[in-house]
Amino acid sequence: MVGTAGNLSARLPDDSFWITASGKPKGQLREQDFVRVGLDGGVKEVPHPDSRPSAETSIHRVVYRLFPQAQACYHVHSVEANLVSAWYGEQVELPPLEMLKGLGVWEEQPHVCLPLLENHLVVERIAQEIEARWSTESSPVPALVIRHHGITVWADSPQAALNLSRS
């Protein structure tokens, strides 16, 4: 992640999670650069008094509510994801790459699509659309793309989420 472009979170056993504080350079994170938040959105712990949760905390909250197996969620504002999101409609078709095993796809010549959601200035609206879409169906892969915004991945560990975000 370049500069402050995105946010990372890791879930705790009590269902709260640590998320990167807003505006922190991701290549220089320290322990005090995280804020602990509950699934209800309430801030539970702030190691540094000037820190506030990421603007995209609502996306992490909804991922943890919808996918109980998720123990880490990474939201990356990558140039590549933003460019690709301009070329597709409601989903991003992925080529049958070996790297799809990282998404849990173990098939010969798989047909895999990442869900593509619209971007909104008010991030809570993005979270509401994620919840509306997956509260009645399961996600085919642990990832989604937000048009002109970035990619969000979730996994059962921080290392697995890191691997997915690099796929």
Image (cartoon, rainbow, N blue to C red):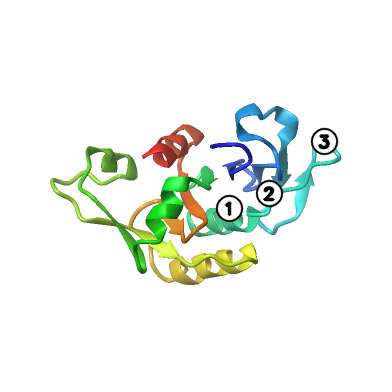
Residue under label 3, please give it: 48
Res 68 seen here = no
Task: Give the mark, 2 or 1, whose residue is nearer the N terminus.
Answer: 2
Q: Quadrant of residue 30?
A: top right
| Frontmost residue, 19 versus 26 | 26
Inter-mark Cα distance, 2 to 1: 10 Å
Q: Is residue 97 left or right of residue 80?
A: left
Point 48% across, 45% down: residue? 78
* Mark 3 surroundings: few (<14), some (14-19) or many (≥20) residues within 10 A: few
Under mark 2, the amino acid is: Ser
Q: Is residue 13 left or right of residue 142?
A: right
Q: Which residue is outermost to the left?
A: 108
Residue 3, image x, y percentages? 61, 37
Residue 21, image x, y percentages? 71, 42
| Frontmost residue, 140 versus 20 | 20
Dividing the image into 4 quarters, which one contains the N terminus? Answer: top right
Image depth: mark 2 or mark 1 in front? 2
Under mark 3, the amino acid is: His
Tell me whether circle 2 and circle 1 mark residues in contact (CB < 8 Å).
yes
Point 25% across, 46% down: residue? 105
Q: Is residue 11 left or right of residue 44?
A: left
Tell me whether circle 3 and circle 1 mark residues in contact (CB < 8 Å).
no
* Mark 1 surroundings: few (<14), some (14-19) or many (≥20) residues within 10 A: many
Task: Give the mark, 3 or 1, whose residue is nearer the N terminus.
Answer: 3
Specify the label residue 60 is tagged with. Answer: 1
Inter-mark Cα distance, 3 to 2: 14 Å
Residue 75, image x, y percentages? 53, 47
Residue 66, image x, y percentages? 50, 59
| Frontmost residue, 122 versus 142 | 122
Q: Quadrant of residue 106?
A: top left
Inter-mark Cα distance, 3 to 1: 21 Å
Task: Give the mark, 3 or 2, whose residue is nearer the N terminus.
Answer: 3
